[in-house]
Image (cartoon, rainbow, N blue to C red):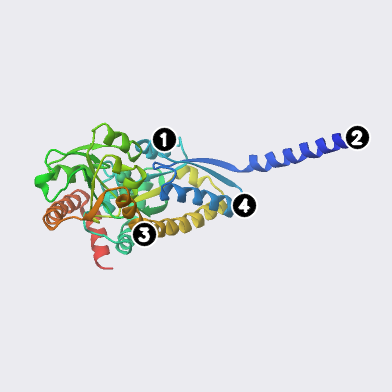
Amino acid sequence: MKITKLVTLAAGTAIAIVGSASLASAQKWDMPMAYSATNFHSEHGVIFADKVREYSGGKMDITVHPGGSLFKGGEIKRAIQTGQAPIGERFMSAHANELPILAWDNQPFLATTYEDGDKLWAAAKDTVNAALAGQNLTALYTCPWPGQGFYFKKEVNSSADTQGVKFRSYNSTTATFAEELGMLPVQVEAAELSQALATGVAEAFISSGSTGYDRKVWEHLTHYYKVNAWLPRNYVMVNSAAWAGLDADVQAAITKAADETGAACAAKSAELADWYFEQLEANGMTVTDAGPEFLAELKTIGAKMQADWLATTGAEGQAIVDAYNAM
Ligand code: PCA
């Protein structure tokens, strides 16, 4: 009896050793993400990590940290650039203040469908990737949010109704948009949005139905105006030096996983777009198209903002718009 036990124990120990040896040979990467765990972007981060594990035969083991839990949204890019995190995800146009070209997906009414968004990305991709490379970053995949519209806590028919409203912006473009409408912008991460609305720091914002649903904004706000002003993207990026240090087969595994995940995430975004509106309505919000007067004002402001962006980005920005228009 004693002998059997010993043998069992020994066998168990041997298995444990083999198990940890194969785990130890896997490279482990932590992947900070900015949005909540149940958001489709974050869920696709997990799908991506699973695919990488599978395609690399277990050589790369990525752990996703959603909701700004490892690094806050605003800290993720710097953390990757400096190698504090090898990989991570962030809202691309949040970086337009340091790299204006990254506002390519934030140009009002330039690309307002998923299909046009894909064309615009095809037109912008090389320029964007070159700009990121200059910051020690390599983009792996991007994924669009649904179209952007406005949340308020009252009926809004024109800029006469938006004067002095405290507005949560998510980048410099949306802050400018708000100012043009006489609102007072304050930048707040999606992760802190519910709190900002609850404390009155913000009482309006622009976003997709997705973020309104994630943050249960019906607890504080009443109206959503569909505008489809643009479909901004999140992107998953790696530190270029960390990337260069990977074996070619691991790089290929990650690239394959990234290509598949980017496509799946975009399809999910399109599939969920109207569902989010239904959820907002089911929770008591009024969801309608922006009225003609408000929309006309938004288009005028949008044209001015695009002109400003082209003035800032010069030939590079113009080449993206020209290539897109030629598609
Ligand atoms: N949700 C994100 C960015 C765009 C979107 O739809 C947010 O509001 O932070």
Say whether residue 226 is visible.
no
Q: Nearer the viewer, residue 49 or 125?
A: 49
Secondary structure of the residue carrying tag 2 is loop
User: In the displayed structure, would residue 179 be above or below residue 232?
Assistant: above
Snapshot quadrant of residue 165: top left
Q: Is 257 placed left or right of 139 in the picture?
A: right
**Residue ID for mark 2:** 1
Looking at marks 1 and 2 on the same chain, the residue that comes earlier in the sequence is marked by 2
* Residue 57: image tag: 4
At label 2, which amino acid type do we have?
Met
Is there CB contact under 8 Å for labels 3 and 2? no
Say whether residue 19 is visible.
yes
At label 4, which amino acid type do we have?
Gly
Residue at the bottom extreme of this rendering: 327
**Marks 4/2: CA distance?**
40 Å
User: In the displayed structure, would residue 293 be above or below residue 160?
Assistant: below
Q: Nearer the viewer, residue 19 or 216?
A: 216
**Residue ID for mark 3:** 270
Looking at marks 4 and 3 on the same chain, the residue that comes earlier in the sequence is marked by 4
- The response on whether ligand 1 sits within 8 Å of label 2 is no
Looking at marks 4 and 2 on the same chain, the residue that comes earlier in the sequence is marked by 2
The residue located at (41%, 57%) in the rendering is 268
At label 1, which amino acid type do we have?
Phe
- The response on whether ligand 1 sits within 8 Å of label 1 is no
**Residue ID for mark 1:** 71
Q: Position of residue 153 (x, y in %)?
A: 21, 42
The residue located at (28%, 48%) in the rendering is 284
